[in-house]
Image (tube, helix red, strand yellow):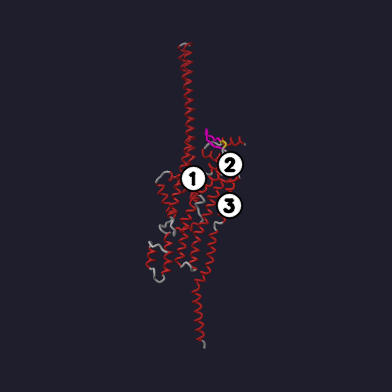
Amino acid sequence: MTSPGTPTGKLSELLRGASGHAVIEGVLIGTQKVLEHMEGVADFESHALAMFMRAAAFGGPAKEGAAELAAAATTSPTGELPESVSSLRQMFVTLTSTTNLSFKCVRKALMKMVKAAAKKAAEAARAASAKGFYKAQAASAQRAYDQAVKKFADMAEERAKKKIATKARKDLLKEEALEKAAENAQKKTLSDALERVQNRAIDAASKEAVGVSRRAGSIVGLGLLQSLVGDLQHDVVALWLDAMRTQCDGLAQVIGSTNPVAQLVKQACLLGPEGLEGMLAVLVVLVVDYPAMDCVCKLPEGQTVRARSRLACMQTRSRLGCSRRACMHTAAARV
Amino acid sequence: MQHRVCVSGELTCTEQDSNDVIREICLDGMLPVDYEAWTKRLIRSDADGQQSMCFQSMDTANQRLLTAFDRFQSRLFKATQVVESTLDYLTAAFKVAGASALLACLCARVCCCP
């Protein structure tokens, strides 16, 4: 039955009782099925891109995430689909509406980006705490310098007092000049040392910040794409491929449903969504399932705990920008 | 396993549970929601359970890969089956037209024959 509110439904009602109504109703139902999923039909990319741009225009963490996702989508192997898939997709995107899927995709991507931004912020906080450590080191050097200067002054004063009691005024003046020169030289040496420590601390902190940001960016972009593929697989089937199947059924109904030509059209049309679903399944297994299991299941199977832990230690070291020696030392000590 | 902290610009590694490494490395990347839940469930189970979950999951993934194009092939087979009847359907009109034309010609020849 056609929906009474739609133009095809009204037309069907109008022709009810007329000769050939049964045939016309089949055609109308088929037409409605095809048109139903063509509302707001537009290219998936343009839809999604427009929404991304709108979301990115608000600024904040999504802007950077969108840039990373775009970079990962254009450079990673998952972003470059085979030509047959692209042509199939092109054919169906001009027939089937992808508005719902685009909305869902953008919403998921934005959520993931915010999550990634939070992780990045945590990394930055860790780097900042390391920077704080260097600052504390610089402050302690400053304290040591002050203490040394004070001690030196006290000692000089003490010595001068002793000399006042034992030597003549002239000798004392000469001695004071010498002491002052020595004090100045000592102060200069200490201030040079302090400056060196501070410069080293600032250099190390800025290098850390740049390194953390770069590493986090490259990891997040690709991870985001894989995560999106994994999360959206069911939505792609439900919102896009199922709509295509309904349209194929409608197309067959328009032609006659039971005659061989209609059957052929239906089967040939359904080859599109079935093929796309197969390719999606392969993509999900290769891009999502295997890497996830490689990470989780390889630990007890292929690698020893010590080797894995050392690898983990190295990875964290590289993330935090620490030196390599500590990892090597602890691993060597344990062996 | 080791716990990692950055002290004095160097990395100090201390003993830590193996599940923490999975939590730190695997859950640190952006896993899909399904796999995140699966990994958390795996961390909570014992060693045998973890192994069994991994085997099961790997089998499922392999099976999915093997059967990915089954529906497509089934549909292709159905389409080829329909092709024959479609050709019959489409050429039926020509067959009828051709047969009647031949009959008419024969009749005409018979009639015209001396």
Give the distance between the C-alpha atoms of the residues marked 2 and 1, in whole angstroms.
22 Å
**Mark 3 residue type:** Asp
SS category of the residue bearing label 2: helix
- Whichever of labels 2 and 1 marks the residue nearer the N terminus, that label is 1
Secondary structure category for the residue under label 3? helix
Mark 1, residue position:
A220
User: Which residue is label 2 attached to?
Assistant: A308
Q: Is residue A268 above or below residue A316?
A: below
Q: Which residue was labeled with disc 3?
A: B59
Q: Residue A192 got which mark?
A: none
Q: Position of residue B18 (x, y in %)?
A: 57, 41
On screen, residue A294 above or below A195: below
Please tell me whether mark 2 or mark 1 is closer to you in this view: 2
Mark 2 belongs to which amino acid? Arg
Q: Can you see residue A28?
A: yes
- Disc 2 and disc 3: Cα gap in Å? 24 Å
Query: Magenta residues, as a range?
Result: B2-12
Let me know if marks 2 and 3 both belong to one chain. Answer: no
